[in-house]
Image (spheres, helix red, strand yellow):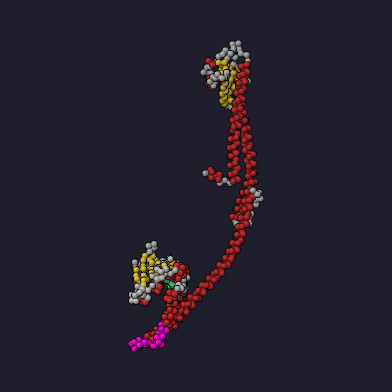
Amino acid sequence: MATRWVRELSISYKLPLLLGASVAAIVVIASAPAWLRMRELVRVGEYELSRTLVQAWLEEHPDADGTRPRRVIAGATIRAIPIDEIDARDERATEAFEALPPPSADRAVDTVMLERWEGLGRRYLYAERRPAPDGEPTLIVLERVSENAGVQLGVNSLYVFGAGFVVLGVALVAFYLISSRLVLRPLRSLRLWAEAVRDGNTDERVDITTGDEFGQLAETCNLMLNALREREVRLRAINTSLDGKLNQLAEANATLDEASRLKGEFIANMSHELRTPLNAIIGFGDLLLDVARQETSELPEGENPPPILERRTRYLEHIVSAARGLLHLIESMLELAKIEAGRVRVAVEPADLGELCRGAAMMMEPQARKRRVGIELDLRVSPRVETDPRKVQQILLNLLSNAVKYAAPGEDEDRGDGEVIIRLESLVAEPAAVRLSVIDNGSGIPPEDQERIFQKFEQLDASETRSHGGAGLGLAISRELAAMLQGELQLVSHMGLGSMFSLILPVSYDHDRPAMQPGEQRFEGAVSRG
Ligand code: ADP
């Protein structure tokens, strides 16, 4: 608590406070030996005085019987008592005698001095054990009182400690002046500068020209601020140019949106205009083909059809097949344009995916038989899924038609044994979704092309692909549809082994999920897992 209070104190208080405390401690520690020595010197002086007084008394002529009378010299009472006659009632003599060191052969005379306070005065009791002229040991006792010893001691102590505290005061004043000039003033300048910069005034500079560490720090701060200012100016310029670019981009975006809308409209109108004559071409082509085939069938048995009839039949077949391809392309383009314009809605209802798979397999059967490809159903679950069944069917038919197209054909003319599998399974990692896969045993798709084939008009440029026809729109449409159904298309393919296209579909459609913007689907919905 107290240390926290000291820690949070301003440095202009903290420095003198801590320094004052340490100098005071130093003064006390340094003065203590001097004070003790002074006391010792006073004691030695008192001892010497007592001894000299006793000596003077001893040098006086003794009485006729060899004894000396009790005397008072300079306020001190001196008397001699034979050791044997020390009376226990004589407290002073008894106390002094007991304090004497034990007799020793080395010393002729043993001495002792006791002292004690009496108010402000000090009482001294000095004693000697020495032999009397008759040879008997005698105790010489001196008693005296120094009346103003306390005052003397106080004055002396005052001198000793006073000197120390004068040193302390001078040290503090000197330290205050030095620290405020060398430390506190530059610190204050730095603080004021930092506050100004914090408040956004980047024109402020630190004005310290001392050349010491504070001066260097101030110079560094000023340089840092200059660099900051430069960077700020550069950033502002970049920002302005970015703003301009952003405006340009927004304008370009608006133009693109408009162009895209016009393109969609154009494709929709054109498709409509093209479909009518194309249907007529296909219809009349079919009719003419029927007539040609009729004529061929009416020929007598064993007779070869005339070359003109044969050629007419072949050309008509080409016309009808090309017109059908064109119609398919136009319909695909129309569909994609509608999806991208956000005009295709999702109609969610409970759907039996197993039933859907069986229906799709039946629809593809004739096409598969033609290529001698068998379609096998592997329905591991039969979930009822809340989704748009027509869109799921469209995706499935597209995947199936690709699989049938690219699967390796079997040997048997009648029965397809080339392998295409429709698999329906639940996902271990994601129980709220199902996986509908179409697996073929074709030549596979190279890893570097696995992303590309989901783009519009992208086809693998192998002769095999070319020979199968198609416009390269089927997977692009399927991907958009998968995203609309809140699912995704996945592809796993290995060269020489075949491909597996999977539609991952949530079991229930989330109506609260915000609808994607037109065209946004192209960033979602297709994942390639090589
Ligand atoms: P397309 O109408 O040409 O089939 P898609 O978008 O459906 O258009 O397919 C794009 C291309 O992806 C195809 O041209 C083909 O090269 C390749 N592809 C699609 N499915 C398969 C598959 N099962 N096996 C091999 N290649 C495939």
Please state the quadrant of the image where ligand 1 appears: bottom left
Residue at the image position 61 percent from the left and 55 percent from the top: 224
x%, y% of residue 73? 62, 19
Q: Residue furthest right?
A: 209
**Residue occupying image coordinates x 51% and y 18%:** 88
Vertical order, 142 against 400 (above or below): above
Relative height, residue 93 to residue 252 (above, below): above
Q: Is residue 177 left or right of residue 328?
A: right
Could you say where residue 346 lies in the image, as x and y percent from the top left? 41, 71
- Residue 435 versus residue 204 in the image, above or below: below
Q: Quadrant of residue 330?
A: bottom left
Which quadrant would residue 16 be assigned to in this image? top right
Residue at the location (33% across, 87% down)?
A: 301
| Range of residues picked out in magenta | 295-317
Question: Does residue 508 appear in the picture of this structure?
Answer: no
Outermost residue toward the bottom in this view: 300
Could you tell me which quadrant the C terminus lies in?
A: bottom left
- In percent of width and height, residue 434 lies at 38, 66
Q: In the figure, residue 488 lies in which quadrant?
A: bottom left
Which residue is situated farthest in the top direction here? 64
Q: Is residue 407 above or below residue 211?
A: below
- Image coords of residue 394 (percent x, y): 40, 73
Dominant secondary structure (helix, strand or loop) of the stretch shown in magenta: helix
| Magenta-colored stretch includes residue 302 | yes
Q: Residue at x 40, y 74 (%)?
A: 405
Q: Choose between 321 and 516: the one closer to the eye.
A: 321
